[in-house]
């Protein structure tokens, strides 16, 4: 098990949600006498061009980035699980409608679809969760649909249908345990993807609106001073990298476990 990746994620979650209990500097406080100060004992990770403490802003911005990442991935994975399993179980017209819906969403690249939707609203954490969820469920749904087709073709499912067992009972009792590993793999991938999507939008100025902040907005604020103040963009970029890298490692491990289980079966 990738224990180091799990440790990094746990540390970053505690850092973001409980770090302010141990580091009391205000992330919104402006200090004209402390503009672009490099990392020091007074400001552990330095300050930005408005004199705001980078470490305090990373703690505050981490809450928003992680909430968006986990919330978006959870909703998108649930949508994909429900639509994919229904399409694979019922087939026929429902499956054809599912394929048309997925093709419609995949007509446009996901990030450009995100840009189009965000450009018409004032972005907030909850708005971004909804938009990223709506544009990120297709991959999970296609994987679930493919696996559901295999489950539906099993003899015991056909016997249950002939016996007129409740369809809801079949889905929850027989489909859910088999589809759960795929869901969790998709969820872990989705968290990293959502954080990267939010960071990309914030970097382009279409993400979180001030005074709210995220790792993406902090990173974006340092792009104009990167040559003289590397720390402004480096540390939020490092946080984004650590979270996505750890989630990819965990996803790969879960995928290996799923593959080994399929081979044994």
Image: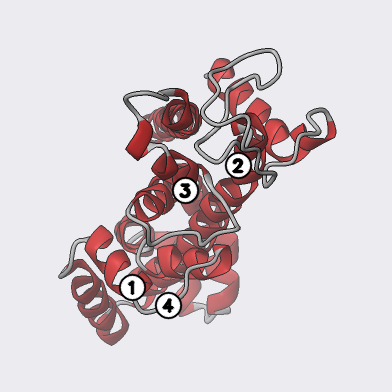
| Disc 3 element | helix
Tell whether 172 sits left or right of 88.
Answer: right
Which disc number belongs to residue 217?
Answer: 3
Look at the numbered discs 4 and 1 and tell me whether their residues touch, using CB distance below 8 Å.
yes
Between disc 3 and disc 2, whose residue precedes? Answer: 2
Kindly give the residue lying farthest to the top in the view shown: 41
Mark 3 or 2: in front is 3
| Disc 4 element | loop
Residue 1 against residue 56 in the figure, above or below = above
Name the residue that disc number 1 marks. Answer: 119
| CA–CA distance in space, label 3 to label 2 | 11 Å
Out of 236 and 258, give the one closest to the viewer: 236
- Badge 3 local density, few (<14 within 10 Å), some, or many (20+)? many
Between disc 4 and disc 3, whose residue precedes? Answer: 4
Which disc number belongs to residue 121?
Answer: 4
Residue at (68, 37) in percent of width and height: 16
Kindly give the residue lying farthest to the front in the view shown: 33
Name the residue that disc number 2 marks. Answer: 62
Where, by quadrant of the figure, is residue 245 drawn? Answer: top left
Q: Position of residue 171 (x, y in %)?
A: 53, 68
| CA–CA distance in space, label 4 to label 2 | 23 Å
Residue 129, visible in the rendered structure: yes
């Amino acid at each position: 098990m990738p224990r180091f990746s799990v440790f990094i994620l746990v540390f970053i979650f505690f850092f973001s949600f409980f770090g302010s209990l141990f580091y009391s500097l205000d992330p919104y406080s402006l200090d004209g006498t402390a503009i672009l100060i490099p990392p020091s004992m007074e400001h552990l990770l330095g300050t930005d061009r408005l004199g705001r403490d980078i470490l305090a802003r990373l703690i505050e911005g981490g809450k928003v980035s992680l909430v968006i990442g986990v919330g978006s991935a959870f909703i998108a994975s649930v949508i994909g699980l429900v639509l994919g399993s229904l399409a694979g179980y019922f087939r026929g017209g429902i499956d054809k409608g599912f394929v048309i819906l997925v093709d419609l969403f995949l007509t446009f690249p996901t990030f450009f679809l995100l840009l189009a939707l965000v450009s018409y609203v004032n972005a907030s954490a909850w708005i971004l969760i909804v938009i990223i969820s709506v544009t990120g469920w297709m991959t999970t749904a296609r994987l679930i649909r493919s696996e559901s087709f295999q489950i539906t073709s099993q003899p015991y499912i056909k016997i249950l249908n002939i016996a007129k067992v409740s369809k809801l009972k079949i889905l929850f009792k027989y489909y859910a345990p088999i589809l759960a590993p795929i869901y969790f793999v998709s969820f872990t991938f989705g968290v990293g993807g959502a954080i990267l999507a939010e960071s990309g939008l914030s970097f382009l100025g279409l993400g979180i609106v001030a005074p709210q902040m995220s790792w993406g907005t902090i990173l974006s604020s340092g792009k104009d001073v990167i040559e003289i103040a590397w720390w402004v963009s480096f540390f939020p970029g490092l946080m984004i990298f650590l979270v996505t890298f750890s989630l990819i490692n965990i996803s790969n491990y879960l995928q290996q476990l799923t593959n080994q289980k399929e081979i044994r079966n």
